[in-house]
Image (cartoon, rainbow, N blue to C red):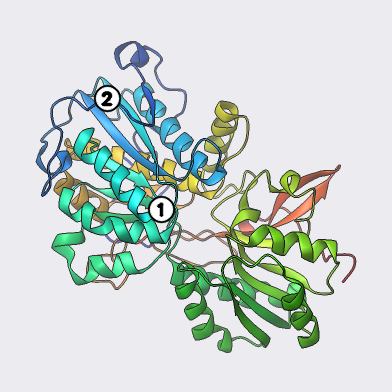
């Protein structure tokens, strides 16, 4: 998210207002543009059903009367990560429909949601349903890297812009870089790619490790696709820090018993377990807290990012630290808290990170389509490449086609002041306030809300 070029929309990273910024849009717009919520299989979009070799976005000129946003999410009915993707796309569509400026030629912007089931084959099937059967003009979502990598060729075939809002594998951006004309329709709005996730862990440790008292760490990384580039970045850069790596363990996928692993961490004498976990995260946290292991716990722990995780674990996550895109306490931009509160009001709870990113993706796409006066994907690609959109997570800018991470969101680490362009993830700690859990922000300092608390048993 460092600026590539000119700004898209009426504003951008300079802090001025983009088109359709406000949630309280003109209510009369709803009389003209009926909002349709389409969860699961929706009706076929009017005008174009798509075909292999070029979806609706590749041939449509202008703004059609009905615009379809296709959403791919894991189990959105009960998975908080999938729910945040689906609900945030709907919130963005409602905001667009309320706006007199965004996609004003369209009578309706609707959302069609498909469950990927975190399965590559199911993801491909559901993607084709969105683009071929329903004529989606753009697609967004996708949580697991395994699903995303199986979608890259269908995205190329349909020539319909897809903005990823969950999967982190840099292999997708490598494909864009190596065969731009074929794969240029893929953008990653977030999170930062897997290599940058690992770089961010090291950057945080370098900036805050001494304040936390983490002079030595034990690296614990779960063995899944998403952690491969994370571990590579840690291995590449942690040696630059004045931090001792007391042990390193890449443990088996599906691990449930962390006793032997934690015994090894204790034996190593590490001050903290420095982790990259998602699928195995809850057993790791619960057993660490239950057994009051004499080391601290932090890094990237995807489930700890969930705003409801404190109650879900009975407070076991207290004192854990994790990287996050944003929290309900982090005012990264003037849009962050407004979005979080609007989401909470609409859904009875705050979003996880995929929500912030999905909302940014849909709003950025709508701003670019409005500025360009078309939903044509080739024009949208050009617009996104030049766009600098201020979203909830920061300034949404993409690496250019010649960069090794082509079309990935740009990463810009800062400590004391916001980057002029680029996203700078936060690091939070679960703390207790009046018996309830709060995602207090430790870093960066310009949005920090509390000091670090050491577990009392350490």
**Quadrant location of residue 446?**
bottom right
Q: Name the secondary structure under disc 1.
A: loop
Inspect this view and state whether residue 297 appears: yes
User: Is 406 on the left or on the right of 50, as rendered?
Assistant: right
- In the displayed image of the protein, which residue is found farthest to the right? 457
User: Is 132 on the left or on the right of 269, as rendered?
Assistant: left
Residue where numbered disc 2 is placed: 43
Q: Position of residue 59 (x, y in %)?
A: 9, 40
> Callout 1: 10 Å neighbours few (<14), some, many (20+)?
some
**Quadrant location of residue 60?**
top left
Q: Nearer the viewer, residue 432 or 331?
A: 432
1 or 2: tag closer to the N-terminus = 2
Q: What residue is at 40 percent from the left and 65 percent from the top?
A: 169
Q: Position of residue 54 (x, y in %)?
A: 12, 46
For residue 321, above or below residue 395: below
Q: CA distance from mark 1 to mark 2?
A: 24 Å
Q: Quarter of the image containing the C terminus?
A: bottom right
Q: Position of residue 46 (x, y in %)?
A: 18, 24
Inspect this view and state whether residue 452 appears: no
Q: Quarter of the image containing the N terminus?
A: bottom left
Residue where numbered disc 1 is placed: 119
| Residue 326: mark in rendering | none
Q: What residue is at 29 percent from the left and 70 percent from the top?
A: 174
Q: Position of residue 130 (x, y in %)?
A: 27, 38
Q: Nearer the viewer, residue 239 or 300?
A: 300
> Callout 2: 10 Å neighbours few (<14), some, many (20+)?
few
For residue 5, above or below residue 194: above
Q: Name the secondary structure under disc 2.
A: loop
Q: What residue is at 23 percent from the left and 38 percent from the top?
A: 137
């Amino acid at each position: 998210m460092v600026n590539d070029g000119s700004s898209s929309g009426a504003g951008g990273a300079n802090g001025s207002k983009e088109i359709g910024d406000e949630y309280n849009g003109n209510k009369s717009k709803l009389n003209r543009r009926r909002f349709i919520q389409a969860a699961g299989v929706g009706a076929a979009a009017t005008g174009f059903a798509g075909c292999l070799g070029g979806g609706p976005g590749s041939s449509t000129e202008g703004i059609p009367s009905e615009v379809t946003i296709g959403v791919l999410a894991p189990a959105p009915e009960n998975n908080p990560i999938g729910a945040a993707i689906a609900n945030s796309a709907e919130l963005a569509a409602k905001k667009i429909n309320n706006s007199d400026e965004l996609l004003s030629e369209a009578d309706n912007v609707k959302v069609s949601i498909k469950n990927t089931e975190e399965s590559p084959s199911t993801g491909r099937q559901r993607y084709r349903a969105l683009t071929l059967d329903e004529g989606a003009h753009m697609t967004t979502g996708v949580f697991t890297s395994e699903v995303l990598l199986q979608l890259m060729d269908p995205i190329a075939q349909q020539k319909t812009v897809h903005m990823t809002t969950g999967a982190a594998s840099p292999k997708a951006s490598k494909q864009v870089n190596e065969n731009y004309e074929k794969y240029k329709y893929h953008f990653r709005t977030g999170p930062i790619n897997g290599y940058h996730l690992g770089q961010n862990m090291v950057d945080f440790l370098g900036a805050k490790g001494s304040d936390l008292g983490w002079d030595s760490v034990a690296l614990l990384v779960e063995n899944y696709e998403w952690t491969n580039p994370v571990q590579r970045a840690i291995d590449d850069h942690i040696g630059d820090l004045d931090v001792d790596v007391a042990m390193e363990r890449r443990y088996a996928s599906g691990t449930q018993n962390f006793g032997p692993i934690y015994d090894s961490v204790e034996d190593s004498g590490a001050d903290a377990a420095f982790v990259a976990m998602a699928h195995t995260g809850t057993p790791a946290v619960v057993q660490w807290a239950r057994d009051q292991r004499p080391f601290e716990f932090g890094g990237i722990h995807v489930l700890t990012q969930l705003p409801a995780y404190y109650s879900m674990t009975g407070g076991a996550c207290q004192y854990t630290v994790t990287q996050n895109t944003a929290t309900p306490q982090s005012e990264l931009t003037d849009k962050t808290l407004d979005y979080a509160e609007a989401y909470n009001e609409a859904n009875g709870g705050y979003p996880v990170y995929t929500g912030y990113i999905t909302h940014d993706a849909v709003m950025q796409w709508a701003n670019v389509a409005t500025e360009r006066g078309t939903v044509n994907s080739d024009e949208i690609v050009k617009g996104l490449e030049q766009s600098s959109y201020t979203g909830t997570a920061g300034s949404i800018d993409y690496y250019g086609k010649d960069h090794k991470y082509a079309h990935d969101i740009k990463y810009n680490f800062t400590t004391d002041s916001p980057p002029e362009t680029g996203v700078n993830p936060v690091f939070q700690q679960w703390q207790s306030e009046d018996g309830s859990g709060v995602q207090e922000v430790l870093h960066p300092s310009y949005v920090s809300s509390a000091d670090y608390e050491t577990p009392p048993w350490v």
